[in-house]
Amino acid sequence: MALKITVIGTGYLGATHAAAMAELGFEVMGLDVVPEKIEMLRRGEVPMYEPGLEELLRRHVAGIEGSSGRLRFTTDFAEVAAFGDVHFLCVNTPQKHGEYACDMSYVESALASLAPHLRGSALVVGKSTVPVGSADRLAAYLAEHAPAGGDAELAWNPEFLREGFAVQDTLHPDRIVVGVRSDRAEKLLREVYATPVGEGSPFVVTDFPTAELVKTSANSFLATKISFINAMAEVCEAADGDVAKLAEAIGYDDRIGKKFLRAGIGFGGGCLPKDIRAFMARAGELGADQALTFLREIDSINMRQRGRMVELTREALGGGPFLGKRVAVLGATFKPDSDDVRDSPALNVAGQIHLQGGQVTVYDPKGMANARRLFPTLGYAETATDAVRGADVVLHLTEWREFRELDAAALGEVAGARVILDGRNALDPEVWRRAGWTYRAMGRPTA
Ligand code: UDX
């Protein structure tokens, strides 16, 4: 009989995983403790912007015309426990308020609600990003709280999806990593990830701590690449070099690779910043803090980029206070193809200039509602053109395709001054310069 799957937590990770599992032909039940979220999902609506996710969901949610009916949602833990053979824990693990450490309370409470109802041979699979050692602890909890006489067990299967590519990354992962303690758990997970998802994806079987560490070390490496190139950008500026050319040239070396070497205002979002901080905090608890002190530097190089962008803006405006200056900001989300503004470098830069008296107007293709909620005192415009109208300087802070396709000449007609600062090194300098703009980017020569 085909496996039945449940997905606990329906944020980015859970909603995508649930829809992908239904796409693969499994019967799936998704659970969230927020009833409004479940109501939306039952209508086939996604609570965030993620390309392709709503379509995928609507193909499978029961009750939607023409759907496969394989995907259902509930708020009831007893119902998912009775339904599923394999339960994926996909809840959030945010940064603790005012601390570096990871807040495990959502994972813990999900397991506490699920465990007493579990059927005998259920497999609970953690997908959330957690501090190393968590799976060991959660397995002990499960052994104690699952119904007596059964053999419910835990496995760890980190998820590497990127926002904006969540569907693609889930259906065609680079690799599948499973931390298991039994052949049975491995066999079940191999069954879940059998074709087409598993096809062509390396399947790495390991222990719990390694599985947990693969995720945090992968994110640390990505963060390191970005901060490395941003450090080079700072040196390029001082030496009159060009960081974009430098990145291209070092990237031809396969051992280095071209990806994640785009200099600019740095990384943000709900993962990289909090994951490297939680990793440092955990290493400290384990007595291995010396090993990760470099991550502190990675974090501080990253945060410094935001301040450097503010100073570049001040310089472009002739120095001195921002008071009375009109600043157009293109981009609010932490990356394109997402409406996520969590720890967004773009909004941080906009907020700093606003706090220093600048008159900031922000436009973003998908992030306006979230940005307005988080930074209600900033100015907002409905189009890029409206944001730029009358501006003394234009900041390009999130690399949406819409901004690369802007008509630089037409925008020049409405701008107060033709000065654009590219905080993402993603626009074509020649296009803007030809249209009469002064183009500047971090780590690149002025002309
Ligand atoms: C990241 C990891 O990539 C993913 O594997 C993991 O599962 C979750 O965390 P995500 O948060 O979606 O995914 O964002 P990512 O695409 O990694 O970008 C992170 C940030 O780095 C963005 O703010 C982006 O603008 C920035 N970035 C990325 C750069 O500044 N330069 C680059 O070259 C690449």
Image (spheres, rainbow, N blue to C red):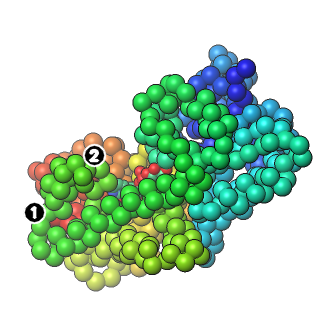
**Residue positioned most to the top:** 66
| 312 displayed left or right of 16 | left
**Residue positioned most to the front:** 183
Residue position marked by numbered label 1 in the rendering: 447
**Residue displayed at 14% across by 54% down:** 249
Q: Identify residue type, mark 1.
A: Ala
Q: Position of residue 361 (x, y in %)?
A: 41, 61
| 98 displayed left or right of 177 | right
Tell which circle, 2 or 1, labels the residue nearer the N-terminal end: 2
**Residue displayed at 44% across by 37% down:** 202
Q: Secondary structure at mark 1?
A: loop
User: Alpha-carbon neighbours of circle 2 within 10 Å: few (<14), some, or many (≥20)?
Assistant: some
**Residue positioned most to the bottom:** 320
Residue position marked by numbered label 2 in the rendering: 404
Q: Which mark is residue 431?
A: none
Q: Position of residue 423 (x, y in %)?
A: 30, 61
Q: Is residue 239 above or below residue 361?
A: below
Q: Position of residue 127 (x, y in %)?
A: 61, 48
Q: Position of residue 125 (x, y in %)?
A: 66, 44
In-front residue for pair 70/332: 70
Marks 2/1: CA distance?
A: 19 Å
In-front residue for pair 421/16: 16
In-front residue for pair 286/230: 286
Q: In the rendered image, is residue 207 in sight? A: yes
Q: Identify residue type, mark 2.
A: Arg
**Residue displayed at 84% across by 48% down:** 146
